[in-house]
Amino acid sequence: MLGSSGQVFVYNKTKETFLAFRVNIADSVAGRLIGLLGKRSLKPDSGVWIVPANAIHTIGMMFSFDVVMIDKNFKVVSVKELVKPFRVILPKMRAESVIELPAHTIFRSRTEVGDELVIDRYEARKTPQPDSARQLDQIESGSRQGVQA
């Protein structure tokens, strides 16, 4: 998968909408077991991606949330809206992982079975400088070298 730490974003390629921007990856035994336990709510645009998983429970949870189950190709195989505490979501055989999202995310993003998701890490990229800024940097560094010599 994408590794054991950090955050990813979840984008619905089919509907061209974002589901969440700050989704924690739970791919260790402890991370999958704990999931959202102990949390009082999910912040907007956040979530937990449980990898691997094809079922979940909400025993001990304190709030309702949305669940999206996806296969190995990130295709949606099941959606459950407003899953309440103390429930069990039975296994979906085609599901490889589960994304737990704030309530109403599925409705807001129009996500449905069959949609293709994109899940990826944020990458900080250096902004390319225009040619004039590069030339100015070269002139300044050249003049500093002349002063130091």
Image (cartoon, rainbow, N blue to C red):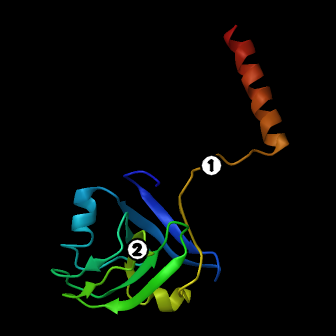
- The earlier-in-sequence mark between 2 and 1 is 2
Residue 81 is situated, as x and y percent measured from the top left of the image, at 39, 91
> Cα distance, mark 2 to mark 1?
27 Å
Q: Position of residue 140 (x, y in %)?
A: 75, 28
Q: Is residue 70 above or below residue 72?
A: below
Pick whichever, 43 or 143, lies toward us: 43
Mark 1 neighbour class, 10 Å CA radius: few under 14, some 14 to 19, many 20 or more: few
Residue 103 - label: none
Amino acid on which disc 2 is placed:
Ile
Q: Quadrant of the C terminus?
A: top right
Q: Total number of numbered labels?
A: 2
Q: Residues within 10 Å of mark 2 (few under 14, many from 20)?
A: many
Mark in front: 2 vs 1: 2
Furthest residue in direction front, as rendered:
93
Judge left or right: residue 75 versus residue 15. Answer: left
**Residue at the disc numbered 1:** 125
Residue at 39% from the left image edge and 89% from the top image edge:
80
Q: Is residue 31 left or right of residue 119?
A: left
> At 37% from the left edge and 52% from the top edge, which residue is drawn?
4
Q: Quadrant of residue 137?
A: top right
Q: Nearer the viewer, residue 78 or 15?
A: 78
Q: Do callouts 2 and 1 mark residues in contact (Cβ within 8 Å)?
A: no
Percent of width and height locating residue 119: 53, 65
Picture quarter containing residue 46?
bottom left
Relative horizontal placement of residue 70, taking residue 42 as reference (left or right): right
Q: State the mark number for residue 99.
A: 2
On the image, which quarter does residue 116 sit in? bottom right
